[in-house]
């Protein structure tokens, strides 16, 4: 099984597949494969016996939906929704910056690895978070950031977040926008909408 671009009707997710989805995805994966850690995480998801369906849509809220939940809506695999131009605020030492859209995709792939490797724990926390338990959500997110996102960001020389709630303030976002450059082709304009 593998990460596969979604085909057909995606209206249940509220977004349409971007016409350049394959190009965005291929460029992000090529970039992520420069990190040994990212390459290993992608391989775990690609070798799992349940497909991960990818919806690429600009201006969406990225998310991972595990197979137990997505199957209730008729999907044949787990689902990742990813914004190919979306950025995550971060810090590179004292410098305010962003993480690339590729790293945002890796973050969602990291949730897939959590589900594969710690399924009972993941499903329990995801269900609790779905029910409004903010502590369960933070536990899932911070585990993913610490275990997957931060090591990959460091290998790729990108900024990091200390935790899920580590967002830049308004003035810092302006500074980050001034200095950020997307580190792979196609999306050099990613921070401009």
Image (cartoon, rainbow, N blue to C red):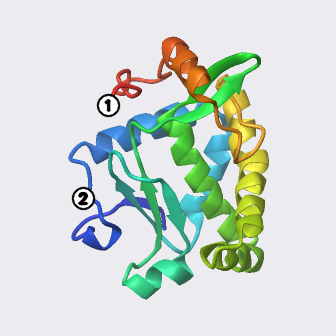
Q: Is the residue marked by circle 1 packed among few (<14), some (14-19), or many (20+) residues within 10 Å?
A: few
Q: Residue at x 69, y 37 (%)?
A: 152
Q: Is the residue marked by circle 2 packed among few (<14), some (14-19), or many (20+) residues within 10 Å?
A: some
Tell me where residue 172 sits by quadrant.
top right
**Nearer to us in this view, 191 or 165:** 165
The residue where tag 2 is placed is 16
**Nearer to us in this view, 154 or 189:** 189
Q: Residue at x 75, y 80 (%)?
A: 120
Q: Real-space Cα distance between discs 1 and 2?
A: 18 Å
Spot occupied by residue 111 in the image (x, y as percentages of width and height): 63, 60
Q: Which quadrant: the C terminus? A: top left
**Nearer to us in this view, 16 or 19:** 16
Q: Is residue 27 visible?
A: yes
Q: Please tell me whether residue 77 is drawn above or below residue 34 in the rendered image.
A: below
Left or right, 28 with reference to 109 = left
Task: Indicate which label's residue lies in the foreground, 1 or 2.
Answer: 1
Q: Residue at x 65, y 20 (%)?
A: 96
Spot occupied by residue 168 in the image (x, y as percentages of width and height): 64, 31
Q: Is residue 42 visible?
A: no
What secondary structure is found at the residue carrying circle 1?
Answer: loop
Q: Please tell me whether residue 14 is drawn above or below residue 158 in the rendered image.
A: below
Tell me where residue 167 sits by quadrant.
top right
Left or right, 154 with reference to 170 = right
What secondary structure is found at the residue carrying circle 2?
Answer: loop
> Is the residue under label 2 in contact with that under label 1 (CB below 8 Å)?
no
Spot occupied by residue 174 in the image (x, y as percentages of width and height): 52, 19
Q: Earlier in the sequence, mark 1 or mark 2?
A: 2
Spot occupied by residue 52 in the image (x, y as percentages of width and height): 47, 65
The residue where tag 1 is placed is 193
Q: Residue at x 65, y 51 (%)?
A: 41
Q: How many marks?
A: 2
């Amino acid at each position: 099984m593998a990460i596969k671009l979604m085909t057909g009707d995606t209206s249940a997710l509220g977004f349409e597949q971007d016409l350049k989805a394959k190009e965005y995805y291929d460029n992000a994966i090529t970039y992520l494969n420069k990190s040994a850690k990212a390459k290993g995480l992608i391989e775990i998801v690609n070798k799992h016996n349940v497909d991960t369906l990818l919806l690429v849509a600009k201006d969406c809220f990225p998310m991972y939906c595990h197979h137990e939940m997505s199957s209730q809506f008729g999907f044949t695999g787990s689902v990742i929704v990813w914004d190919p131009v979306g950025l995550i605020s971060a810090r590179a030492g004292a410098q305010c910056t962003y993480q690339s859209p590729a790293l945002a995709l890796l973050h969602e792939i990291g949730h897939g690895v959590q589900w594969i490797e710690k399924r009972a724990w993941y499903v329990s926390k995801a269900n609790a978070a779905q029910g409004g338990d903010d502590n369960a959500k933070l536990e899932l997110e911070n585990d993913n950031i610490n275990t997957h996102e931060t090591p990959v960001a460091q290998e790729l020389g990108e900024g990091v977040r200390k935790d899920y709630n580590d967002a830049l303030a308004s003035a810092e976002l302006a500074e980050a926008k001034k200095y950020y450059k997307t580190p792979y082709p196609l999306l050099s304009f990613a921070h401009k909408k």
